């Protein structure tokens, strides 16, 4: 019976630790000459982590301009034509809808594909306090002494460290996927460019070869129009 209560305690604490904060990953398209903005509400005391990367620049450079503004429109962060960057705005003093804008107005023809991740969290959310312990006491009916006897705190600390490490691994994998997508798009663009130049050069070689054959035949063919033209030119 105590094992089921312990399991229930672990689940409540784990869910309490994972439901706090906001983590969003998205890939968007920013057309040439356009500005795309996203809004997200942030409360006082929270911290914003924002990371972005241009994974496809169409036929242009892998760059984009980025601006982060607070609810009253003041610019917090401003980047101009960068391929990627990471920003952290600590301890929000004023809550409201924060604005994140990607600016591709400097590009005339190329649409940009941008991957970004937005994390909003409150400092100390990773640690469990006495309030959460009291809530667990009410749900499970176990006393503090029973918690200490079963070393729940040690177990929760261990689970919390595992959860944080798993979140870091997942974020790193997402960043690696964005790098892979950017490299693949760049390789495909270069491959298409090489093919186009190869076709152009082959066509030029074939055209020059046919022209040479025609010129030689016209020189030795005495009954042709070109032969008379060469004779008039003195060739």
Image (spheres, grey):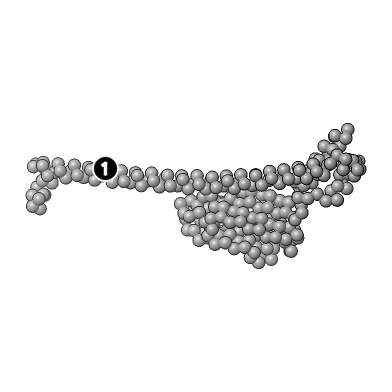
Residue 2 pos. (x, y %): 88, 35
Q: Nearer the viewer, residue 212 or 168?
A: 168
Number of labels in the image equals 1
Task: Please tell me which residue is depicted at 86% across the width and 37% down the height of the picture.
Answer: 5
Task: Please tell me which residue is depicted at 85% across the width and 34% down the height of the picture.
Answer: 3
Task: Please tell me which residue is depicted at 62% across the width and 46% down the height of the picture.
Answer: 172
**Badge 1: residue crowd in 10 Å (few <14, some 14–19, many ≥20):** few
Q: Is residue 175 left or right of residue 98?
A: left
Which corner quadrant of the image does residue 225 belong to?
Answer: top left
Residue 76 pos. (x, y %): 64, 64
Q: Nearer the viewer, residue 69 or 10?
A: 10
Q: Nearer the viewer, residue 15 or 154?
A: 154
**Quadrant including the N terminus:** top right
Q: Is residue 100 left or right of residue 204?
A: right
Residue 106 pos. (x, y %): 50, 61
Residue 84 pos. (x, y %): 56, 55
Q: Is residue 234 left or right of residue 92?
A: left
Residue 124 in view in this figure: yes
Q: Is residue 195 left or right of residue 121?
A: left
Residue 30 in view in this figure: no
Please give the residue where the numbered disc 1 appears in the rendered image: 206
Q: Nearer the viewer, residue 76 or 96?
A: 76
Element carrying mark 1: helix
| Residue 1 vertical placement versus 197 (above, below) | above
Task: Please tell me which residue is depicted at 90% across the width and 44% down the height of the picture.
Answer: 144
């Amino acid at each position: 019976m105590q094992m089921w209560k312990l399991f229930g305690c672990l689940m409540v604490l784990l869910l309490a630790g994972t439901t706090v904060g906001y983590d969003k990953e998205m890939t968007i398209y920013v057309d040439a000459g356009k500005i795309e903005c996203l809004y997200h509400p942030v409360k006082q005391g929270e911290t914003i982590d924002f990371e972005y990367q241009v994974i496809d620049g169409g036929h242009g450079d892998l760059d984009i301009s980025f601006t982060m503004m607070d609810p009253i429109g003041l610019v917090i962060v401003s980047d101009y034509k960068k391929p990627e960057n990471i920003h952290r705005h600590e301890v929000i003093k004023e809550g409201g809808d924060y604005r994140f804008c990607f600016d591709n107005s400097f590009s005339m023809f190329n649409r940009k594909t941008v991957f970004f991740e937005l994390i909003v969290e409150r400092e100390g959310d990773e640690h469990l306090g006495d309030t959460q312990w009291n809530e667990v006491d009410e749900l499970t009916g176990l006393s503090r002494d029973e918690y200490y006897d079963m070393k729940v705190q040690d177990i929760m600390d261990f689970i919390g460290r595992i959860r944080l490490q798993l979140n870091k691994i997942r974020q790193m994998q997402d960043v690696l996927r964005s790098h892979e997508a950017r490299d693949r798009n760049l390789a495909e663009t270069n491959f298409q460019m090489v093919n186009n130049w190869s076709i152009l050069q082959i066509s030029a070689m074939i055209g020059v070869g046919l022209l040479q054959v025609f010129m030689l035949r016209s020189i030795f063919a005495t009954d042709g129009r070109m032969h008379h033209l060469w004779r008039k030119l003195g060739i």
